[in-house]
Amino acid sequence: MKFLDEAKIFVKSGDGGAGCVSFRREKFIEFGGPDGGNGGRGGDIIVEVVANLNTLIDYRYQQHFKARRGYHGMGKLRTGQDSEDIILRVPVGTQIFDEDKETLLFDLTKAGERIVLCRGGDGGFGNAHFKSSTNQSPRHSGQGWPGEERWIWLRLKLIADAGLVGLPNAGKSTMLAAVSRAKPKIADYPFTTLKPQLGVVHVDEREFVLADIPGLIEGAHEGAGLGTKFLGHVERCRVLLHLIDGTQEDVVGAYKTIRKEMKAYSPELAGKMELVALNKIDALVEEEIEEKAAALKKAAKLKKGQVIYRVSGAAGMGITELMRKMLEIIDADKAREAAEQAEMMQGIEIEA
């Protein structure tokens, strides 16, 4: 299945059905009268979040979604049938933007969520509705209310607890394969990964979701390489793992390049909790490891107690300790978020 994380579509809910102009004309009934029924309601455009999707590829081949109008009313006070709704199924983490691509309408982060994007128009009244003591044979009816229509952007931001960032060939795909059952493409040339990959990491009978983001290069915020196209997928992560290829000469330059591109993309993303790891240590001697780790620690301006992790995804060295630390940070962030929500709900109860 192809990966698509952005799509522009047109949606229109159904117009309401027209009311009916009708009169009773049965034989042997002394007094007739208006008996036109109301029109039915137009179909809604509904967005539903489903758990087993991870791409917006369905909206690459169909961009227009129009619900049917409601059925017309009929004689004998028969109301027209409401039209069928159109349900758009999207992955968890989908955001819906207005046509300007900046105004966020909905942020869908939970499986099972359903929102009405465009509400169908109400049906028009039949002539029986207009009957009164002064107008006993009305000969007009309502035509139904129009539905809503708009162009929208769908943008997918994958839901992951942690994200992998780094230059091409830093070993991100190898690391993902080493700590999870994901099977990303692994090769010895840059830009092996062309789309985000997700893997479930199991640590001490616990688990969390790790995302591998295609490598950034210098000038990515200006469109170089793959640009910052996929950085949005790590905006929801609670912690970032910054991998540095230990076999290259300038590890400090590699670190600063990624940090610069992240800051240019979003200061909020650059401010997320970050763990820095010197990768591929199985190809280095002890003196090189110590020297490069010290240089990275100075460049990253680590606080007291923070360290540069020394790992090798290919050889499986140091990754268990690193995954445990990531899980610890994820748990702490979830606890902080839960406490904030509880405090907010308590404040609402007090105001009520």
Image (cartoon, rainbow, N blue to C red):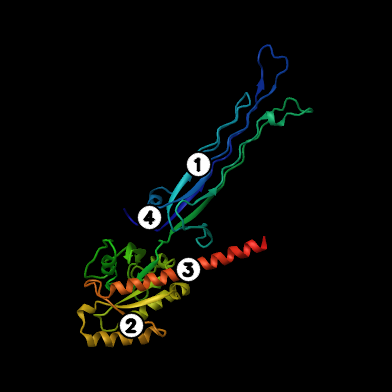
CB within 8 Å, label 3 to label 1: no
Residue bearing the label numbered 1: 85
In the displayed structure, 177 sits above or below 134; it is below
Q: Earlier in the sequence, mark 2 or mark 4?
A: 4
Residue at disc 1, secondary structure: loop
Residue bearing the label numbered 4: 55
CB within 8 Å, label 4 to label 3: no
What percent of the width, then of the height, locates residue 252?
33, 84
Q: Earlier in the sequence, mark 4 or mark 1?
A: 4
In the displayed structure, 175 sits above or below 308; it is above
Q: Earlier in the sequence, mark 3 or mark 1?
A: 1
Q: Residue at x 67, y 60 (%)?
A: 352
Residue bearing the label numbered 2: 253
Task: Name the outermost residue toward the top.
Answer: 28
Q: CA distance from mark 4 to mark 3?
A: 30 Å
Graded by Cα atoms within 10 Å as few (under 14), some (14 to 19) or many (20 or more), the crowding at tag 1 reads some
